[in-house]
Each structure stands twice: as structure tokens, then as C-alpha cells.
Amino acid sequence: MDAEKKKEIIDNLTTFSKAKDYYAEIGKAWKRGYLLYGPPVTGKSTMIVAIANFLEKKNKEKEEEKEIEDTKAKEESSYGSSKVTLSGLLNFIDGLWSACAEEPIIIFTTNYVEKLDPALIRRGRMDKHIEMSYCGFGAFKVLAKNYLHLDPCLKLLEDCWMRSKWLLDEFDAKIY
């Protein structure tokens, strides 16, 4: 993820987490819905973990959620899948909002945002839509630096990237 998008998300989360009194003052429910969308394997689930860590959610809560998910998965495999109506899902989400007391945040993810009903992803339910895409070179450099400790190699990688980009541009120019 590029640095600008990351900063925008962090700023949004920070502003929301500090705005409980403001929401009460204007008579609006203190809640936030996020929609993460994009192709498979672009970091949507990782983003949820990062958001939870940023908001300092306890590991115990994550384990409880995992246990609930595991139980639901076992029940579904035992009894077959059941149909969920859009109306039922919207009522569930709206009920979940009212049941949450602290930092009520819901995060939806999808690979196919265009297939979702507009009522499900409208502003007010999903306030922030975040497109997740494949890693660009800038984001790759950050990952390489942070996780692979490739500082000495980054200049070489950048040179290779620029050279390959130049070669592709040359190739395209000759074809077209």
C-alpha cells in the first residue's frame, strides 16, 4: 500500500476514535463501516489485522472471534449452507451497531464490489471504501526494507525495476 493511502486510513481511524463526544454532541451514532475491496490476495485480511492492532484490540477478542468463526464453519458444514436475505443481513448489521458500546467498527471485504447491493455498501453503513490493489514498486520497497532487511539491495532493485520498465517501453514503442 502506498504511503499516502496508508496515512489517509490512519488519519481516518484516529479521527474516528477520538470523536465519540462529537458524535454524541450532534446526535449521530458513533460508528464506522469500512469496505475493503479488490482482487484476491491483495491484503484485505491483513489490513483488518493492521486496523485492529492500530486500535489496540486485545488478542483475546481476536481469539474469541476466531472461535465463533470456527463454530459457525462447523455448523454450516454439518447442516449445509443456509440462505441469507439482503434484508436479514442489513437488519443484522444495523442491530450490531446498536449492540456495540466501544469503537463500533465493522469491516466488510469483497473481491467483487460491483456485485454487492448498493444498500449494503451505501455511506452510513460503509462510510469508508478502500480499494486494495496489487503491490506497486514503492510498496514493495517498504516491504523489502521492513521484513527482508534489504537496505543495501534496494538501489540495485530500483535500478533493475527502472531498466525493465525502460525495456518494456522500448518494446511497446517498436510494436505500436
Image: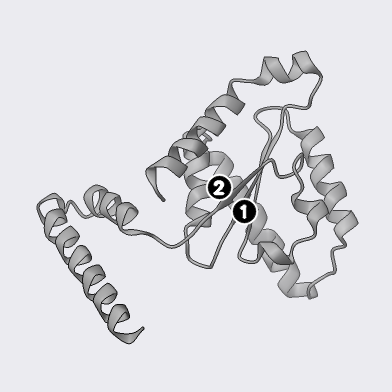
Question: What percent of the width, then of the height, locates residue 129?
Answer: 63, 48
Residue wearing tag 2? 63
Q: Is residue 50 left or right of residue 20?
A: left
**Residue lying at 36% horizontally and 59% vertically, measured from the top left:** 136
Task: Specify the amino acid type for callout 2.
Answer: Glu
* Up/down of 45 relative to 28, above or below: below
**Residue lying at 33% horizontally and 86% vertically, measured from the top left:** 175
* Up/down of 163 relative to 133, above or below: below
Determine whether the residue tagged by mark 2 lies in a helix, strand or loop.
helix
Residue wearing tag 1? 67
How many numbered tags mark residues here? 2
Q: Is residue 140 visible?
A: yes
**Residue lying at 70% horizontally and 64% vertically, measured from the top left:** 114
Disc assigned to residue 81: none
Q: Residues within 10 Å of mark 1 (few under 14, many from 20)?
A: few
Q: Is residue 59 visible?
A: no
Question: What percent of the width, then of the height, locates residue 88?
Answer: 88, 55
Task: Specify the amino acid type for callout 1.
Answer: Glu
Question: What percent of the width, then of the height, locates residue 130?
Answer: 57, 49
Is label 1 in contact with label 2 (beta carbons under 8 Å)?
Answer: yes
Separation of disc 1 and disc 2 at Cα? 6 Å
Residue toward you, 145 or 95: 145
Tell me which colouring the rendered structure shows: one colour
Q: Is residue 70 left or right of residue 54?
A: right
Question: What percent of the width, then of the height, locates residue 40?
Answer: 53, 68
- Quarter placement of the C terminus: bottom left
Quadrant housing residue 144: bottom left
**Residue lying at 65% horizontally and 57% vertically, measured from the top left:** 69
Q: Is residue 164 left or right of residue 20?
A: left
Residue toward you, 145 or 82: 145
